[in-house]
Image (tube, rainbow, N blue to C red):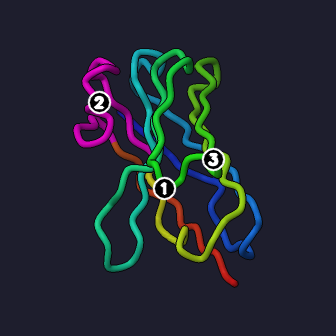
């Protein structure tokens, strides 16, 4: 049974940091690119960041580059996202996703195979 379980969300003051984790099970984690998305109230889900199977290649939303860092541990079957200098507009439910398509296809932005249930991040000013 495939599972992606996010954790690490919470309430944080603007300017603070959070580290999200996504623990994967039920599939061969090291074969998949992994991605983070977010969905704010009343808005569509948007791409945040992605990392290829080995961790060598990453991709970020242009608006978030420099504040968020994605990483992975293929021994622990976990993908992380370090979020720094958080802003109230970063408030959203954050989801991780797994993608088996070739990295060069860019399908991690809109064609993911598996999704987690999400973790809430709330940034207050």
Q: If the image is split into quadrants, where does the N terminus sit?
A: top left
Q: Secondary structure at mark 3?
A: loop
**How many numbered markers are drawn?**
3
Closer to the eye: label 2 or 1: 1
Label 1 crowd bin: few (<14), some (14–19), many (20+), radius 10 Å: few
Q: Nearer the viewer, residue 67 or 40?
A: 67
x, y percent for residue 121: 58, 67
Q: CA distance from mark 2 to mark 1?
A: 18 Å
Mark 1 and mark 3 residues within 8 Å of each other at the beta carbon: no
Which residue does the image show at 41% across and 52% down from the upper left? 37
Residue interval drawn in magenta = 96-114
x, y percent for residue 77: 56, 26
Q: Which residue is mark 3?
A: 66
Q: CA distance from mark 1 to mark 3?
A: 9 Å
**Drawn side of residue 95 relative to residue 21, left or right:** left
- Residue 124 circle label: none
Q: Secondary structure at mark 2?
A: loop
Which residue does the image show at 55% across and 42% down from the upper left? 22
Which residue does the image show at 67% across and 47% down from the upper left? 82
Which residue does the image show at 48% across and 42% down from the upper left? 60
Q: Which residue is mark 2?
A: 106
x, y percent for residue 31: 41, 15
49 in relation to 57, above or below = below
């Amino acid at each position: 049974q495939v599972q992606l379980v996010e954790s690490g969300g919470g309430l944080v003051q603007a300017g603070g940091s959070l580290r999200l984790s996504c623990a994967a099970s039920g599939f061969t984690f090291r074969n998949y690119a992994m991605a983070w998305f977010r969905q704010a109230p009343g808005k569509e889900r948007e791409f945040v960041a992605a990392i290829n199977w080995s961790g060598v290649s990453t991709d970020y939303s242009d608006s978030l580059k420099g504040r968020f860092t994605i990483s992975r541990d293929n021994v622990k079957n976990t993908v992380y996202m370090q979020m720094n200098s958080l802003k109230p507009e970063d408030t959203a439910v954050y989801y991780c996703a797994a993608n088996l398509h070739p990295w060069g296809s860019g399908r991690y932005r809109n064609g993911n195979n598996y999704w987690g249930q999400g973790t809430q991040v709330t940034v207050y000013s």
